[in-house]
Amino acid sequence: MSKLPNAHKFIDLSDYGRPVARSISLVLKDTKFTPIHVTIGFIISGLFAVVCIINGHFWSAAFFLIFKSILDAADGELARIKQTPSYTGRYLDSVADIILNAIILLALWYITESNIWYTILAFLGIQLQGTLYNYYYVILRNKFNGDITSRVFEVSTPKALKGEKQKNVNILFAIYKVLYGSFDKVIYFLDQDASKGKVLPKWLMTAISTFGLGFQLLIISVMLVAGLKEFIIPFFIGYSLMIFVFIAIRKML
């Protein structure tokens, strides 16, 4: 189930796991499993990947990283199929993602004995990449009646939807703001007028989708099994320069 109308769909390179995610959600549709259970599943898969990275089992790590990406899509699919959108699920998903990203990079730092400051720089780069992609994607979804649980600007605590507790939304939103607030501000500062501009062409959204978390995890997986673990952290530092390239292209359009 797409987050965009057919006329505005683009090839999302970070969403390669969507077909499998949709199949998983269809299997779980008439069960007691909720989107939150699936989110917990991707957290567990991500932690398994970290253990595999530390112990040098890179093929297994790649499997769990990609499986984590698939489940990351499946929780949202299940919420849409069951028609149970929630801010609890939306913020839990995001909070889990950023914490797992940090742990995965620390694991890579540990096995490669990289400079810790380079690792921090790579983490910041990965988060800014993902924030830019989400920023443009949410603008599209808002313009064309997309997912109501995602907002262009996360400023105030949203009102809990049916079936969820306001207390849970309040807590998770507060954590979300602490973890993501600075990244949102940086991207907004770099491209304040994005929501007022023309609809981004599909080819540009496809290019920017390489900043999506699913594609980032795929890159890490491929580089691990290819014996290029020492180059993962430098790659994400360098690829972060594309943030300025994509924003410049968006402004020229």
Image (spheres, rainbow, N blue to C red):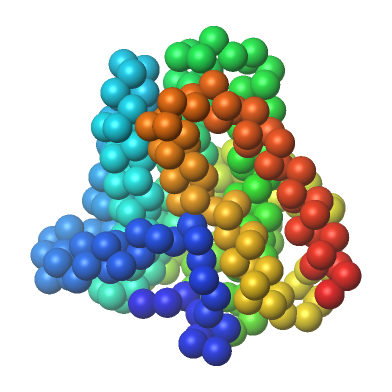
Q: Is residue 181 visible?
A: no
Position of 56 relative to 60 (above/below): above
Q: Residue at x 86, y 67 (%)?
A: 251
The one nearer the camera, 201 or 190, is 201
The one nearer the camera, 234 or 5, is 234
Q: Residue at x 69, y 28 (%)?
A: 121
- Where does the image place residue 51, in percent across and percent down from the top left? 31, 22
Q: Quadrant of residue 128?
A: top right
Q: Quadrant of the N terminus?
A: bottom left
Q: Quadrant of residue 203?
A: bottom right
Position of 137 relative to 186 (above/below): below
The one nearer the camera, 53 or 162, is 53
Q: Residue at x 38, y 32 (%)?
A: 225
- Where does the image place residue 153, in percent across and percent down from the top left? 68, 61
- In the shown orientation, is residue 146 left or right of residue 205? left
- In the shown orientation, is residue 31 left or right of residue 174? left
Which residue is farthest bottom?
7
Position of 187 relative to 153 (above/below): above
Which residue is farthest right?
252
- Where does the image place residue 79, in percent across and percent down from the top left? 32, 67
- Where does the image place residue 97, in percent across and percent down from the top left? 46, 43
- In the shown orientation, is residue 5 left or right of residue 204? left
Q: Is residue 111 visible?
A: yes
Which residue is farthest top?
113
Query: How many numbered circles are shown?
Result: 0
